[in-house]
Image: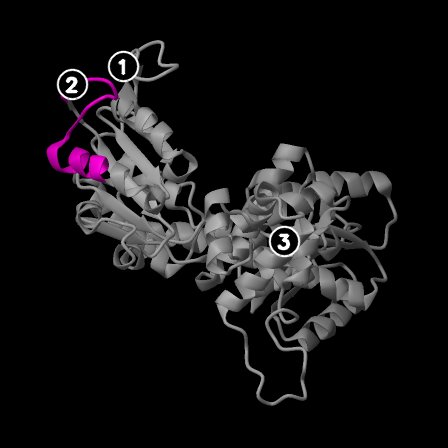
Amino acid sequence: MKKILVIDDEQAILNYLKIFLLQSGKFDIHLLKDSTKAYKLLKNENFDILLLDMDMPKVTGLDILSFINENSINIITIVLTGVEDIDLAIKAMKLKTFDYLLKPVQEEKFTDILDMAIDKAEFKKMKDVSNTSLSMESLIHKHAFSNIITCNEEMLKIFHFVEKFALTDNSILIWGESGTGKELIARAIHEISRRKTNKFIAVNAGSFANELFLSEFFGHEKGAFTGAIKDKRGFIEEAAGGTLFLDEIGELSLPIQVKLLRVLQEEEFYRLGSTENRKANVRIIAATNKNLFEEINNGNFRKDLFFRLNINSIYLPPLRERKEDITLLAYYFLEKFNKKYDKTITTISSDVLDLLKTYAYPGNTRELMNIINSAIIIETGEVLEKKSLPHYFLENTYPADVYPADKNNRNNSLKTLEEVEKEYIKKVLIKTDMNKTKAAKILGISRVSLISRIKKYELD
């Protein structure tokens, strides 16, 4: 239950609000008629939500709002006033009031606003819990994880493994679906490691043709091939002394895998067109969204390379297994894109949060970011509403796509995640006229990952 404080100099209003709030069953209610006692109460008690009258003797609502801001009191304030004063409303909103309502308040609207306030209070609580948990569990390098937004227990355990793995020079393999934050974890490893003062270079291995990858990875000598007009350092030399992150490692062809294995085993390489043996002083962190055991069995990935890369292994859970992070992330992205687009959207409606919590997120955190980004661009009000969400997302949220349409058929069962993903990708491809680049952007995954799924589900 959320702890709520109601400040109003009219006893009748206090009585009404007490009954109204009790009926909801969501609040631990505290009432205050004498506003002169508000300062001490707010400073000594931890309230989640404040319902505040503006027109009170001695200490006004505006005085209390100023006190809250000056003392950085973490509380969500909803103003309830009988005074229709535009200048006062503007002053109140500048003091970070969550909402400003005129009495008498329509009960349905009031209920919706309280629900949104509860969601925002939960977001703040999760943010605080996340920070507290990291501190309580004695993370030594907390700064390295500052860009990873989570309060999920499994993710916090992963952070501890990362701290230990980072202190060695071993290769690391990061597993996880597209959009789960593999590069963020790789950057955290680099920031903690002894190599942190040198370069971190991230490369999507699946984005290069085989011939081009050899040149980009190892570098080349002048005249090594047509167009090689000067010597060029490759990724290995550019990352000398630092860390080279190879994403989509499962996309590398077998001949390139052999050359990469030599770098890992012998710590040496040759530029294209050169016979000079060069030393490779670089730590390699690889990542994949593929099941490499299946790739090995199918003859697409070398077993010896797998074991060289997989000295230390990290698995990142998908967002659908981290439901508690969805509200936290949604508000994080709201703040981020508010600044980017100079918007003043204060909160996310409860309808939108409900939809966000029921979605499967094939594109994981990256897809959630894209959904919020798109919605903020469209939204014209101060609350992020359902109407601003991307059309494809609304078409693919539960229960419509997951629960069978034929309710009379008792043999129906819930669809598997693969079935949902297949239908979802198919719809996006149709919407984009099979434009894989556009579809991948909407899905929040790389073009290579999309092509892989198209093959898997036979959607060509």
Q: Earlier in the sequence, mark 2 or mark 1?
A: 1
Which residue position is annotated with label 3? Answer: 428
Q: Is residue 269 magenta?
A: yes
Q: Earlier in the sequence, mark 2 or mark 3?
A: 2
Structural crowding at the residue carrying mark 2, measured as other residues with C-alpha within 10 Å and reported as few (<14), some (14–19) or many (≥20):
few
Measured in 3D between alpha carbons, the distance from the residue under mark 2 to the one under mark 3, in whole angstroms, is 49 Å
Q: Nearer the viewer, residue 306 or 174?
A: 306
Which residue position is annotated with label 2? Answer: 275
Boundaries of the magenta span? 258-277
The image shows residue 333 at horizontal and vertical percentages of: 57, 45
Task: Give the mark toward the camera: 1 or 3.
Answer: 1
In the rendered view of the protein, which quadrant contains the C terminus?
bottom right
Q: Amino acid at mark 2?
A: Thr
- 43 with respect to 265 (left or right): right
The image shows residue 347 at horizontal and vertical percentages of: 66, 51
Any mark on residue 221, and which?
1
Q: Amino acid at mark 3?
A: Val
- 196 with respect to 66 (left or right): left
Task: Find numbered disc 3 in the image and state the secondary structure of the residue it sits on.
Answer: helix
Q: Earlier in the sequence, mark 1 or mark 3?
A: 1
